[in-house]
Structure formats: structure tokens, C-alpha cells
């Protein structure tokens, strides 16, 4: 953020001033208490934005982690006399561990399993808290929770606690923003755009979702701990089902995709609640929350913050740290060692069935390292299915596939990608919620060194890695001939250029083997020739190519080796000229 | 002869990608019209647009004088248009008879008795299906599935049948049977728009044909005209034509250039 | 383990399991025609119970109260589908699910405002006597629960298997695009399924109200347990969802009886959590899913 020019910097400074002066201007206990309540909820809400807005996982019992934080802090401070700050961190650790244990298996399943599992977790914790009276004080709970302290420094009164809480809010927002403009933020947006394409460049879908779940659990736990030190007590009703619903509504109102919208949403929710209490209609709280959730999602899905942010997005195209550098290095100069033995990919009696239909029938062939191999055959011959089995998108019903000698037929798509196999899709799957450059940067996931903790804390290595990724992306865009398209949005490019973006993204992986699924589909003659040239340049860099293609001119001009399929079987294999003259091949294509 | 289907200057696509650019074709009653073209040329997109699964962004489609480009699929089926989709798309977890009965869903009027009658008629045409009537659809062989898909579409008593690549993935012997089946349908008074990659088989039974390339109609004419035209092979095989050969040569030249200028690579 | 005690727990558990089954089937069918998990499913049951009990308390004749409850359930299903499902069919699924959650919250909150916090008790339709079966003493109302559920289940399975509408619903579940090609109006059928879910949920609530009493927040529990049944049944098959839901009811009752009534919820929800974790963790450890992965 350039403090000199960005108008948002000015607003931020003003807001910080307002928050700093708040307790001095508004002296009532009520106002202070309300602000602390907003602050603690804001911490949990910001975390939930990462889960619901970024990872698109609806969890209905998020307050479970507030409960863990609250009881954790209360018990450790009262019973074990721990320092409140240390207790808070310990409770956060417990919350995050629970989130990991529950989330890791569940987030592998598709659909709304997490929603209910999260609710089940909250309900279980609620019952345990009520029943295990010896530990938790039962329904009455634990009272006499001391004031908050940070490693010995006592937080005097509510005013001091206010500042502590809002510092925590600032840290939470910072953490969220760090995720948003990082590799992980990009990966989450990629997953939201196209899970298939994200897997194909090595993004682990489950892991990204689990990371957000764990992070949000940590923040919810902090919210719980701080609340308990404000209320000076903890009992099962403090973080009930209603609190979970409030967090969800706060995120919806604030804006699903906005970190600071989470703070805004928390403020609006608490404000509404207090307003309802003033008009002595507290039972209407649920009605208002439910109605707001529905109406906002139906009519204004980007929420309050989203609407405001739109104005800025039109003015400044600021999305992540992708700088608009021109490519400085000359493309295509570095060659790679073609290390390893001669066959990079071996298929052995590979088979795939759908019920009674055999889509691929014991197909076997070898792809030579450094070659361009074409897989051809009429529609329905099983070529795409075979490609999908190599890339990890479809399982095998028989046979083996070996890459660089090791079996890959049981690996999921993102693991195959990480081994060094990249692919493109016949139907073109670009991530349309990010720029062209960011699309290509996603391809660098395989080479990322920073982990989620470093990203949240924005350690120095993260900024370096972002810059490096951006440079690499620019380099690959220049290689495919789109050097100055980096800052554009994919849907503004011509179809042929969009195909090039997808290629650049796959190349950014620096694969050993590139699978191309009908790359010439939809291209005109001149674009097809340019594609051929590009494929040759890619091969010249040491990347082996296996392409499925219908355009015979491309196949005959480029391929060193051709494999022909029909009815799921391999019917011919050899040099292009030989294959072209083969009678079986001719009849397969043109009909007998 | 009455024009049953009239597609005039239609453009359509998926999301931001436009696949069809101003396509025009027509089908007259009692004809078999073939629509040929390479993969990705837009054949299936055209059929989906005709059936109302995809909106036509420009142009007009009419069926028996009735404009249909704004109608929903159910209404179009009721008017007498039916599609046998690419790859059949049977309801695999249901048995053959249930699949067929579903085909009659969109038919206006007629109670269970007329459905039964239609069902028996289909079984007469396809005795193999009658044998397998209680079998689950996904357990049928490829040829049987294709027959089931056709029978299912016929249950809708269509005036015009759209067939999307019926020979897909089928053995030559089975293809012969399907081809015969199509000819029989025409002889009984039906009208068919046949989308095929297998040009020879399609043109062998069609009256007229169109060739679509990159979303545009590149060629049209009677079946015999198209069979004799070398441009047909060029258009979607990139086969024997001189322009195709020229491109091949150019590409091969580039390949040689790169091979010559490649730096020596160490092999371990 | 005395058989009579076992029968007591099992049969009363079967009774609550019946309502879970109604909810589970609602989940499965709504998911199959609309693609979303209808979180409001449990609230339909709550509405059925509280409307019936509330009206009876106002001296409305029983049959009228039940009818009103069912009609209201149907109306809610209709409104939900037309106003909050149909308009956003193309929105991302998590957004549609959050809207469904909002609907559930709205319904239960309105119930709180209209009927208040306290639960409504209600006498059984034929009085509060008990009868003896296999050594267990069961309230007479049990017959109504079993009867209503059996009739509903029978009607649903008959509909799905033998009627044109049922075939259409199954077709939409298998392949919505091909279903449209058959001339099936998927939007209209989605609406019908939601109306039926609302009505059947309300019926379930009406018949169980004398046994469990009706309160504004009962929907949460019915929803979670019905969902559990649906997900164990794989979210595709109404039959297995029913079996799982009935089983869950019995299991829960056994836990309450043999362990403690406090532990019952912990055991039930704990089992759900454990089941989901095992489903996710053990079979797909970084490998390719054998089928097209679980849908819900």
C-alpha cells in the first residue's frame, strides 16, 4: 500500500485514530462493553471470513472454538494459575489441533459435511461442558476469572482491555490480509474458480481448506479467551448456537470476500442486537438475522464491504503483489538436462470401465523422453479418458502407469502434478477471478517454499517469494508471446490467447512431461501454426510432450511418434508417415 | 416439402466462449440431413441450442413455422423435436423400460394405455431391448445402449429426431445396424438430422449434408456432391488437401530448424 | 439385559427414529432435485409440532390443527423454493447452502416470537393411555407416529418406483441435463419436492408433538439427526437414509437408557462426528476417489 497516494491509507489512519480515542470520548461502561464485545466477535468473524468466504466452507458450529478458548483460558488461569496470555495461546493451540483432527479427514469429502460436523462438535462441547461439572462447573460455569494479563503485566480495567482487544483485532485483520494477498489467497481463489484446474497445477484442495479451518479456529479461540476475561466468567451459554449464527450473519453482512468486512459485520450485528434490546424486542434478533442473511445473499452477495471495495477496484487494479514488470530475461534460453533413462512415461495394460462399457482396453505404450508423442483416434476412442488417467483425474481399473520409473496410477491429480506432469484442458479452465499473471503464478505452487505460518506472519521470505513468482510468471508469459498481457483479466483476451495463458500456467510448473488435450481446438489456421511453433519451442527446453489432437496437420508435422486408438484399444503405433498409410487407421477415421 | 427445422444465423456459446458464429441450416420433412465436422467445430453446441439447452445469442430457430429459440426444452420436446445425446446419456441406474417410459414424459396427452402401446412398438423395432427390459441401463453393451437411447427418444413421437454421433465408440458391425435403423426410421416417414464424425457412413444414407468448421458452415450440398468433394476431407480431417499438406511441411521445417539449433544436451 | 427393557428402549427409539426418517428423506430428495442441503428440513418438523400443539391449546379441533400444520409446512416449502432456491440456482453451492441456513434461522426465530420460549405439551390424538408391546409400555400416540411414517414411506417409495413423477425425480437425480431432454420441467418438480418435504416434515412434527412436546428450537435436533441418517445413507438413496435414520433413533434411545440421558446426545453426535471422520480419512488417504466422490 503506497501511503502517499492510496486514499485508503488516509481512511485507515482516521479509523485508527477513532478507535484509539473511543474510550476517552465515550466514557460509559456500556459503550466500552459494547466496543469490547464487537472487538472480540470481530476476531472470530475475520477468521470465519477466511473459512466461509475464501475456502467456501460453511461451518455451522464455529462458536465451538470460542468455547474451547473460553474454557481453556478460564481453567488454566483459575485452576493452574497460568498467566492469562500464555493460557490464551495454549487454548488456541488446543482449538487449532481439534480443528486439524476433525477437519483433515472431513474436508476430503465434498459437500456440506463440514457444516454438520462443525455443529455436532459444538453441540458435543456444549453437553460436555454442562455435564462434566467437576471440571467446568456445569451449567453454572466458572466464575471469578481474573482480569487479563500479558506475561505479568496486568490489564487494569475495561479501558485497557479495550485496547488489548482491538490490537488483537488489528493483528487478526493483518493476518487475514496477509493470507489474501499471498500465494494461499490465490490458491483459494483458484480452487473456487475450478477445482479441476487447481489440482492440475499441484494445488492440494483439501490442504488449503484445512489450513483456513485451523486458522479460523485459532482466531475464534482468541475471541473466546478475551471474552472470558472481560465477562470474568465462563458458562455453556456464553457461546451458544446463536453465537455461531451471529458469526455467519456478520460475515454475510460484512461481505463474504472481505477481511475488514468481517470487522464491519461484527459491528453491525452487535449494533442491531443492542438496538433490538433497546426497543425491548430482543426475541426479534433471530428474525432479523435470518432475514438479513437471506436478503443480502440473494440481492447483495458481496455485502457492505464488497460494495465499497468495488468503487476502489475500478480505480486501482490492486490485486495482490503482482507487480507489472516487463519480462527482462530472454525467453527459451535455458535448456535442461534430459537426465534419466529414455522412456519418461510407460503405460502397461491400462484399463478403465464404466459399468459394462470398456472405455480403455489394456492399452500400453511408452513415451520417449524429449519426444513429441501424439495420441489420435476418432471421437469416443478413449483418448481423453486415457489422458485423464495419466494426469490423475480418473482412476484405473487395471494396469500400471509409470513416470520416471515410479508408479503414479494411484496418485491424486495434485500429487501427479507435483511429480512433474502438467496438463491443459480441452475446455480451457482458467481462473477468471484473477489476472492473467496471477493465473500463471498459480502454476508456481509446486516450487513454493513458504508455509502457511510464514504467510500469516508475512515473514520476509514471503515477500521475496512473491516477487520471484511474479517474475517467473512474466517470463513464461513472454515465452508464449503474451508478455504484456499480465495485468489483464482472462475473459478480455481472445480465445487463442486464453489458450496461451493456460499453457503458460502449465509451463510455470516446470514439468518434465506436458499433456496437451486438443490444444488446437477452436483455433484458426494461423493460430494453429503458431501453436505448432510454440510446442516445438517447449520441447526444445527439454519438456516431453504427449498430445491428444484431431488436427492431422499438427500431428503429422510435429509428432515423432503416433499412437492410434479406437474403441478403447490401441490399433496402431509408429512414425507419422507409417501410421498415416495404415489401413486400420484410415477406416477408423473415415469409416469403412 | 415442408421445412421442419430452420436455423438462421445463430450464434451461441458457453460463458464467454462463443462456439457458433452465425450458423444457418435447414431440414425438410422426410429427409436425412448429415452435419459433419471435426471435434470442437460446434456440432453438439448446435444441437443443444436447437433443443433449448443453450440460449441462441443471435439469429432465429423455428420448428414447423413456430419460433423456438426462446422456448424452454420441455416446450420444444412437446412440439415434436427430440435429441439422442452424444454418449447416449441414459439413466444408468434405472432399467431399460424405465428409461423408455421417461422418453414419453414430454408427450402431451395419452394416458398409460397409449404409453404401453408406444412401448410395445419400440420393443418390436428393437427386440434386443425387449429381452433386456428389466436390466439396468448401464449394464447394456454399447450398441444396446445406443438402441435404447434411440428408442427412448422415439417414445416422444418426434417429428424430427436429432442424433448426436450415434456411432461413437461402437464396433463397425454395430454401426451397420444403427445405420440401418436410421434408414428404417426415415422410410417410416421420420425426419432426421444426423451429426457424425464418420463421414462416409453418414453421407452414405443422407440426402443432404452440411460441414461445420470452427463454428461456421463451410460446405453444404447433396450427399453425393459432398462425398465427391475433397474439401470435405480437408475441412475436418486436415487430410489430403494441398493447403493442409503445405501447413504440415511448414511445421516440419520448423521442427528441423529447432532440432538443428538445439544445444547439445547431456544424457546421464 | 432384560428383553422387556431392551424392547422399551428400542421401540421408543424407533418412534423418534420415524421422524428422523421423514427428515432424512426430505434431505435426500431436496438435495437430488436442487443440489443443496436443505437446512430448513428440521424446522418443518418443528413448525408442524408447534402449530398443532398451539392450535389445540386454543381449542381448535384436532383434525383442523393437523391440517393447518401440514398446509403451513407445504406453504413454507413452496415459498422457500420459489423465493430462495429457484432464483439462485446458478450461484455457488456454498452460497445456496448459507441461504438455506438463513431460512432455517428465520423460521425458528419467527416461531420464537409467535409462540414464545416455553414448550407446548399436547395430549395424544386418542388420549394418553399406554399399550403393551413385546414387554414395552408405549404411549398410544406411537401408533400414529408409526402409522403416519409407514404410510408416508410407502407412498414415497411407491411414487418413486411406479409413477411417472417419481421416475422424473429419479432421473433428475441421475442426470439433470438428460432429464430436461425428456421434456421434464426440472424447476416445477423441484418446487413439488420442496412442497412435499414441507408437508411431510410438518406431519412428522404433528404426530410426534404429544410425545416429545413442541418448542421453537426443536428443529435443530431433528435437522442434525435427520441429516445424519441421510449422509450415512449416502445422500442418494431414500431407502438407506430411512434405514440409517431409524437405526439412529434406536441407537440414541439405547444410549439414553443404558448409559444416561445426559450422555445420549454426546454419544449420538459423537458417533456422527466419528463416522464422518472415518469416511473421509481412512478410505481416501491422498489417493484417487474410486467413484465420482461423495456428493454431499
Image (spheres, grey):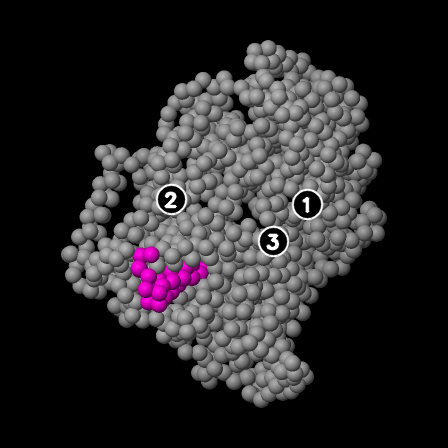
Which one is closest to the eye, mark 1 or mark 2? 2
Task: Using the image, determine if residue B136 lies above or below residue A398.
Answer: below
Return the residue at label 1: B89
Q: Is residue C216 visible?
A: no
The quarter of the image holding the N terminus of chain A is: top left
Question: Where residue C234 sits in the image (x, y, percent)?
Answer: 62, 58
Proximity of marks 1 and 3: CB atoms separated by less than 8 Å = no
Q: Pointer 3 indicates a residue of which chain?
A: C
Residue A521 occupies quadrant: top right
Do we see residue A97 in this rendering? yes
The image quadrant of residue B37 is top right
Q: Nearer the viewer, residue C33 or B157?
A: C33
- Mark 3 residue crowding within 10 angstroms, few (<14) / some (14–19) / many (20+): few
Q: What is the chain letter for disc 2?
A: A
Q: Which residue is mark 2?
A: A456
x and y percentages locating residue A24 in the rendered image: 15, 56
> In the visual, does C46 lie left or right of C10?
left
| Tag 1 and tag 3 share a subunit | no
Front residue of A353/A202: it is A202
The rendered magenta stretch, by its main secondary structure, is classed as helix
Question: Where in the figure is residue A294, as x and y percent of width and height?
Answer: 41, 57
Same-chain status of marks 3 and 2: no
Q: Residues within 10 Å of mark 2 (few under 14, many from 20)?
A: many
For mark 1, give the secondary structure: loop
Helix, strand or loop at mark 3: loop
Q: Please provide the residue range marked out in magenta.
A: A60-86
Q: Which mark is residue C282?
A: 3
Amino acid at each position: 500500500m503506497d501511503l502517499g497516494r492510496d486514499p485508503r491509507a488516509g481512511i485507515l489512519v482516521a479509523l485508527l485514530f477513532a478507535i484509539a480515542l473511543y474510550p476517552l470520548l465515550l466514557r460509559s461502561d456500556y459503550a466500552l462493553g459494547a466496543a469490547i464485545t464487537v472487538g472480540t466477535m470481530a476476531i472470530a468473524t475475520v477468521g470465519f471470513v477466511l473459512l466461509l468466504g475464501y475456502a467456501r466452507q460453511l461451518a455451522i458450529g464455529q462458536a465451538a472454538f470460542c468455547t474451547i478458548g473460553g474454557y481453556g483460558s478460564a481453567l488454566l488461569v483459575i485452576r493452574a494459575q497460568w498467566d492469562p496470555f500464555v493460557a490464551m495461546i495454549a487454548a488456541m493451540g488446543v482449538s487449532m489441533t481439534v480443528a486439524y483432527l476433525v477437519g483433515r479427514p472431513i474436508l476430503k469429502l465434498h459437500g456440506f459435511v463440514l457444516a454438520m460436523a462443525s455443529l455436532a462438535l459444538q453441540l458435543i462441547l456444549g453437553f460436555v461442558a454442562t455435564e462434566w461439572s467437576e471440571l467446568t462447573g456445569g451449567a453454572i460455569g466458572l466464575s471469578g476469572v481474573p482480569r487479563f494479563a500479558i506475561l505479568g503485566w496486568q490489564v487494569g480495567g475495561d479501558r485497557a482491555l479495550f485496547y488489548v482487544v482491538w490490537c488483537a483485532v488489528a493483528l487478526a485483520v493483518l493476518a487475514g490480509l496477509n493470507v489474501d494477498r499471498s500465494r494461499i489467497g490465490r490458491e483459494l481463489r483458484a480452487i473456487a474458480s475450478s477445482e479441476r484446474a487447481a489440482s492440475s497445477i499441484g494445488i492440494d484442495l483439501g490442504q488449503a481448506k484445512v489450513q483456513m479451518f485451523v486458522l479460523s479456529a485459532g482466531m475464534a479461540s482468541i475471541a473466546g479467551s478475551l471474552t472470558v476475561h472481560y465477562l470474568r466468567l465462563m458458562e455453556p451459554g456464553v457461546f451458544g448456537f446463536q453465537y455461531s449464527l451471529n458469526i455467519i450473519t456478520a460475515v454475510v453482512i460484512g461481505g463474504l470476500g472481505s477481511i475488514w468486512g468481517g470487522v464491519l459485520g461484527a459491528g453491525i450485528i452487535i449494533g442491531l442486537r443492542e438496538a433490538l434490546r433497546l426497543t425491548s424486542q430482543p426475541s426479534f434478533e433471530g428474525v432479523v438475522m435470518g432475514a438479513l442473511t437471506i436478503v443480502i445473499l440473494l440481492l447483495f452477495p458481496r455485502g457492505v464491504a464488497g460494495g465499497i471495495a468495488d468503487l476502489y477496484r475500478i480505480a486501482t487494479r490492486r490485486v495482490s503483489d503482482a507487480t507489472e514488470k516487463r519480462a527482462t530475461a530472454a525467453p527459451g534460453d535455458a535448456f535442461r538436462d534430459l537426465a534419466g533413462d529414455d522412456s519418461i512415461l510407460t503405460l502397461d495394460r491400462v484399463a478403465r470401465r464404466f459399468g459394462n462399457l470398456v472405455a480403455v482396453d489394456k492399452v500400453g505404450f511408452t513415451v520417449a523422453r524429449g519426444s513429441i508423442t501424439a495420441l489420435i483416434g476418432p471421437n469416443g476412442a478413449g483418448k481423453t479418458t486415457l489422458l485423464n488417467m495419466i494426469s490423475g483425474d480418473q482412476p484405473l481399473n487395471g494396469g500400471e502407469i509409470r513416470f520416471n520409473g515410479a508408479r503414479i496410477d494411484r496418485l491424486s491429480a495434485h500429487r501427479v502434478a507435483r511429480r512433474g506432469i502438467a496438463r491443459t484442458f480441452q475446455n480451457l479452465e482458467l481462473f477468471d477471478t484473477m489476472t492473467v499473471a496471477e493465473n500463471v503464478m498459480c502454476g508456481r505452487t509446486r516450487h513454493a517454499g513458504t508455509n502457511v505460518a510464514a504467510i500469516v506472519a508475512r515473514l520476509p521470505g514471503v515477500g521475496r517469494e512473491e516477487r520471484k513468482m511474479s517474475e517467473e510468471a512474466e517470463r513464461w508469459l513472454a515465452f508464449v508471446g503474451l508478455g504484456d498481457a499480465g495485468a489483464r483479466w482472462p475473459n478480455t483476451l481472445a480465445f487463442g490467447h486464453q489458450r496461451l495463458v493456460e499453457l503458460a500456467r502449465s509451463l510455470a510448473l516446470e514439468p518434465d512431461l506436458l499433456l496437451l488435450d486438443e490444444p488446437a481446438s477452436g483455433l484458426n489456421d494461423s493460430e494453429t501454426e503458431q501453436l505448432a511453433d510454440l510446442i516445438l519451442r517447449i520441447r526444445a527446453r527439454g519438456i516431453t510432450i504427449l498430445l491428444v489432437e484431431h488436427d492431422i496437420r499438427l500431428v503429422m508435422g510435429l509428432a515423432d511418434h503416433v499412437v492410434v486408438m479406437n474403441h478403447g484399444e490401441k490399433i496402431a503405433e509408429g512414425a507419422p508417415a507409417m501410421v498415416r498409410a495404415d489401413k486400420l487407421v484410415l477406416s477408423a477415421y473415415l469409416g469403412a | 416439402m415442408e421445412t421442419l427445422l430452420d436455423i438462421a444465423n445463430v450464434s451461441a456459446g458457453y460463458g464467454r466462449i462463443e462456439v457458433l458464429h452465425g450458423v444457418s441450416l435447414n431440414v425438410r420433412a422426410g429427409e436425412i440431413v448429415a452435419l459433419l465436422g471435426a471435434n470442437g467445430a460446434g456440432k453438439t453446441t448446435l444441437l443443444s441450442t436447437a433443443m433449448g439447452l443453450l440460449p441462441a445469442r443471435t439469429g432465429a430457430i423455428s420448428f414447423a413455422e413456430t419460433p423456438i429459440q426462446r422456448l424452454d426444452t420441455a416446450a420444444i420436446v412437446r412440439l415434436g423435436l427430440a435429441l439422442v445425446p452424444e454418449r447416449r446419456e441414459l439413466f444408468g441406474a434405472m432399467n431399460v423400460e424405465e428409461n423408455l417410459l421417461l422418453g414419453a414424459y414430454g408427450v402431451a396427452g395419452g394416458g398409460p394405455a397409449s404409453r404401453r402401446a408406444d412401448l410395445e412398438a419400440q420393443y418390436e423395432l428393437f427386440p434386443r431391448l425387449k429381452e433386456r427390459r428389466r436390466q439396468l441401463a448401464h449394464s447394456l453393451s454399447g450398441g444396446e445402449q445406443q438402441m435404447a437411447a434411440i428408442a427412448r427418444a422415439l417414445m416422444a413421437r418426434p417429428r424430427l429426431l436429432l442424433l448426436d454421433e450415434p456411432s461413437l465408440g461402437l464396433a463397425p458391425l454395430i454401426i451397420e445396424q444403427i445405420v440401418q435403423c436410421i434408414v428404417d426410421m426415415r422410410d417410416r416417414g421420420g425426419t432426421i438430422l444426423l451429426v457424425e464424425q464418420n463421414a462416409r457412413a453418414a453421407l452414405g444414407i443422407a440426402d443432404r449434408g452440411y460441414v461445420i468448421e470452427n463454428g461456421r458452415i463451410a460446405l453444404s450440398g447433396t450427399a453425393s456432391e459432398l462425398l465427391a468433394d475433397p474439401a470435405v476431407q480437408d475441412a475436418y480431417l486436415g487430410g489430403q488437401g494441398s493447403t493442409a499438406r503445405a501447413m504440415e511441411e511448414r511445421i516440419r521445417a520448423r521442427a528441423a530448424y529447432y532440432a538443428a539449433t538445439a544445444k547439445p544436451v547431456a544424457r546421464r | 439385559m432384560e428383553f422387556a427393557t431392551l424392547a422399551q428402549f428400542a421401540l421408543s427409539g424407533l418412534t423418534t427414529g420415524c421422524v428422523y426418517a421423514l427428515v432424512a428423506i426430505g434431505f435426500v430428495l431436496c438435495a437430488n432435485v436442487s443440489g443443496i442441503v436443505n437446512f430448513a428440513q428440521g424446522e418443518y418438523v418443528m413448525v408442524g409440532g408447534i402449530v398443532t400443539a398451539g392450535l389445540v391449546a386454543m381449542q381448535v379441533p384436532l383434525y383442523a390443527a393437523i391440517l393447518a400444520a401440514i398446509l403451513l409446512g407445504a406453504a413454507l416449502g413452496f415459498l422457500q423454493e420459489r423465493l430462495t432456491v429457484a432464483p439462485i440456482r446458478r450461484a455457488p453451492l456454498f452460497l445456496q447452502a448459507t441461504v438455506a441456513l438463513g431460512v432455517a434461522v428465520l423460521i425458528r426465530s419467527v416461531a420464537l416470537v409467535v409462540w414464545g420460549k416455553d414448550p407446548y405439551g399436547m395430549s395424544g390424538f386418542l388420549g394418553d393411555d399406554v399399550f403393551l408391546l413385546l414387554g414395552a409400555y408405549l404411549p398410544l400416540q406411537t401408533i400414529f407416529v408409526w402409522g403416519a411414517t409407514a404410510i408416508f414411506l410407502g407412498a414415497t417409495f411407491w411414487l418413486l418406483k411406479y409413477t411417472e413423477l417419481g421416475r422424473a425425480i429419479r432421473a433428475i437425480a441421475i442426470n439433470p441435463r438428460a432429464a430436461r431432454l425428456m421434456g421434464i420441467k426440472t424447476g416445477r418438480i423441484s418446487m413439488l419436492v420442496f412442497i412435499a418435504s414441507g408437508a411431510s416434515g410438518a406431519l412428522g412434527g404433528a404426530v410426534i408433538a404429544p410425545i416429545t412436546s413442541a418448542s421453537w428450537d426443536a428443529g435443530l435436533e431433528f435437522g442434525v439427526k435427520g441429516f445424519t441418517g441421510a449422509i450415512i445413507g449416502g445422500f442418494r438413496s431414500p431407502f438407506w437414509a430411512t434405514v440409517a435414520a431409524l437405526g439412529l433413533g434406536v441407537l440414541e434411545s439405547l444410549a439414553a437408557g443404558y448409559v444416561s440421558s445426559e450422555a445420549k446426545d454426546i454419544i449420538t453426535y459423537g458417533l456422527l462426528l466419528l463416522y464422518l471422520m472415518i469416511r473421509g480419512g481412512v478410505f481416501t488417504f491422498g489417493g484417487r476417489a474410486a467413484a465420482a466422490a461423495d456428493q454431499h
